[in-house]
């Protein structure tokens, strides 16, 4: 059902846990299944210096969160806002149709974490 890249990210997830400062935290629950993802950001001078995740969900949700952290690390917040779930699916080499919503969960949690950071750091 899952390709090797998805299984690799599921079996060896990157950047699991919480970042040191948690400057921005995003929590998202999938309306489709109830699974939940947390994204933690440490931001310095507009750049994502560290990003970690915790996903209480299926293999596709864990793999999507893992690949998301690899993609977002080092980006500016503006660049990270443009990450879409379709890009996560591409980076994973595809997901089964029934599992596309799991990638939405990861992307939405990232966007929520950025919004949280920005709400706390308005000029
Ligand atoms: Fe819930 Fe995948 S089935 S996130």
Image (tube, helix red, strand yellow):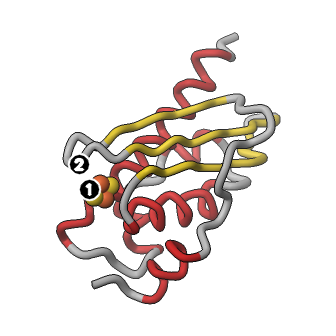
Residue that badge 2 annotates: 33
Mark 2 close to ligand 1, CB under 8 Å: yes
Residue that badge 1 annotates: 101
**SS at mark 1 in the image:** helix
Q: Quick one: label 2, few (<14), some, or many (20+) residues within 10 Å? A: few
Q: Residue furthest top?
A: 123
* Residue 2 figure quarter: bottom left
- Residue 102: x, y in percent? 32, 57
Mark 1 close to ligand 1, CB under 8 Å: yes
* Residue 13 figure quarter: bottom right
Q: Image point 25% across, 65% down: which residue?
A: 99
Discs 1, 2 touching: Cβ within 8 Å? yes
Q: Image point 46% across, 41% down: which residue?
A: 109
Would residue 89 appear left or right of 25 to someone viewing this image? left
* Residue 57 figure quarter: bottom left
**SS at mark 2 in the image:** loop
- The CA distance from mark 1 to mark 2 is 9 Å
Would residue 20 appear left or right of 77 to someone viewing this image? right
User: Is residue 112 depicted above or below 51 in this figure?
Assistant: above
Q: Quick one: label 1, few (<14), some, or many (20+) residues within 10 Å? A: some
Of circles 1 and 2, which is in front?
2
User: Is residue 49 depicted above or below 62 in this figure?
Assistant: above
- Residue 51: x, y in percent? 68, 48
Would residue 50 appear left or right of 38 to someone viewing this image? right
């Amino acid at each position: 059902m899952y390709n090797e890249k998805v299984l690799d990210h599921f079996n060896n997830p990157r950047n699991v846990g919480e970042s040191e400062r948690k400057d921005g935290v995003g929590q998202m629950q999938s309306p489709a299944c109830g699974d939940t993802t947390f994204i933690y950001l440490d931001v310095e001078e507009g750049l994502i210096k560290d990003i970690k995740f915790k996903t209480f969900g299926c293999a596709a949700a864990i793999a999507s969160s893992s690949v998301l952290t690899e993609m977002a690390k080092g980006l500016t917040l503006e660049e990270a806002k443009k990450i879409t779930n379709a890009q996560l699916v591409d980076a994973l080499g595809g997901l089964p149709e029934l599992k596309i919503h799991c990638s939405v969960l990861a992307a939405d949690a990232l966007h929520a974490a950025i919004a949280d950071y920005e709400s706390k750091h308005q000029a």
